[in-house]
């Protein structure tokens, strides 16, 4: 039957050609191992010793040390130039009647700060510190006419919210405390930028919240609740005073409009 198949199909069934016999591979014998003493005279002994390069860690440490020295020198020059008792138009006249207000919102103005602290007494001057671009730096000073009003504001206004942000209140220490330095010169009393999350202060206000067990916790909770209630009452009093003022203005306007209407009616008659 196979001889009936076409030649193209028969080629698939033909045997392959025989394999060609190759000569076996003979391994070449390699020379034995020997030393390099016979080639020492070819080396140049006067070649320079390569310089040791600094590692990335050493470069970083060197740069950090240089920056620390530069910042130290810059800090010393700024401390030498800082004169808190020097007369200036921006400073208040009496340091012992001046209140330091920190952690202010950057959109708070002098008028807003004066409006908030006029509740405690008559204010002589309000100044919010600004940078070179005339933008608020987040803190300012309020000078009262009486030291009694200053004490009341110092004890009550700490932790109060102004424009949705809790403020910190303290006395002015630059002109009242000897050898006092601000935060930018390595001093200050702030604890929000000490180190890691476990060291930084996370509560708002001048003093940390009280904590304890038993009677201590109950007393602290009662004192905190009483202080909150007193603050809320004072806030309500302030809002009621403002509403009364606005209401009085509205009443005066309404009475004036009523008088005009009556006079118009009489003229028409």
Image (cartoon, rainbow, N blue to C red):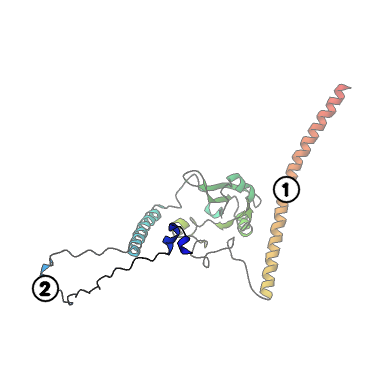
Closest to the camera, between mark 1 and mark 2, is 2
As drawn, which residue projects farthest toward the right?
269
Q: In the picture provided, is 64 more to the left or to the right than 110?
A: left
Question: Residue drawn 38% across and 57% down?
Answer: 71
The answer to whether 169 is drawn above or below residue 43 in the figure is: above
Q: Are marks 1 and 2 in contact (CB under 8 Å)?
A: no
User: Nearer the N terminus, badge 1 or badge 2?
Assistant: 2
* Quarter location, residue 256: top right
The answer to whether 191 is drawn above or below residue 243 in the figure is: below
Q: Is residue 209 or residue 4 the one in the foreground?
A: 4
Label 1 crowd bin: few (<14), some (14–19), many (20+), radius 10 Å = few
Image quadrant where one finds the C terminus: top right
Residue 250 drawn at (x, y percent):
76, 39
Residue labelled with disc 1: 241
Residue labelled with disc 2: 38
As drawn, the label of residue 78 is none
Q: How many marks?
A: 2
Label 2 crowd bin: few (<14), some (14–19), many (20+), radius 10 Å = few
Q: In the picture provided, is 64 more to the left or to the right than 261?
A: left
Q: Is residue 66 or residue 53 the one in the foreground?
A: 53
Q: Is residue 40 visible?
A: yes
> Is label 1 in a helix, a strand or a loop?
helix
As drawn, which residue projects farthest toward the left?
41
Question: Residue drawn 87% across and 22% down?
Answer: 268
Disc 1 versus disc 2: distance between alpha carbons?
Answer: 107 Å
Residue 4 drawn at (x, y percent):
47, 60
> Is label 2 in a helix, a strand or a loop?
helix
Residue 137 drawn at (x, y percent):
51, 50
Q: Is residue 182 visible?
A: no
Residue 263 drawn at (x, y percent):
83, 26
């Amino acid at each position: 039957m196979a001889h009936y198949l076409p030649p193209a199909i028969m080629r698939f069934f033909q045997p392959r050609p025989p394999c060609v016999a190759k000569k076996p591979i003979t391994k070449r014998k390699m020379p034995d191992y020997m030393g390099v003493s016979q080639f020492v005279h070819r080396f140049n002994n006067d070649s320079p010793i390569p310089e040791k390069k600094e590692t990335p860690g050493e470069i970083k440490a060197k740069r950090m040390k240089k920056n620390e020295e530069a910042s130290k020198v810059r800090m010393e020059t700024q401390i030498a130039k800082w004169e808190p008792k020097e007369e200036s138009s921006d400073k208040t006249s009496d340091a012992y009647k001046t209140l330091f207000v920190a952690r202010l919102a950057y959109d708070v103005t002098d008028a807003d700060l004066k409006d908030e602290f006029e509740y405690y007494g008559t204010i002589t001057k309000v100044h919010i510190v600004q940078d070179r671009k005339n933008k608020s730096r987040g803190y300012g000073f309020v000078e009262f006419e009486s030291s009694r009003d200053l004490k009341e504001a110092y004890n009550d206004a700490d932790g109060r919210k102004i424009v949705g942000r809790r403020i910190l209140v303290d006395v002015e220490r630059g002109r009242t405390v000897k050898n006092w330095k601000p935060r930018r010169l390595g001093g200050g009393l702030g604890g929000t930028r000490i180190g890691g999350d476990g060291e930084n202060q996370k509560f708002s206000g001048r003093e940390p919240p009280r904590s304890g067990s038993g009677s201590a916790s109950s007393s602290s909770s009662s004192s905190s609740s009483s202080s909150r209630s007193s603050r809320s009452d004072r806030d309500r009093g302030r809002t009621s005073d403002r509403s009364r003022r606005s209401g009085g203005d509205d009443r005066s306007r309404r009475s004036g409009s009523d008088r005009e209407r009556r006079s118009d009616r009489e003229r028409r008659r």
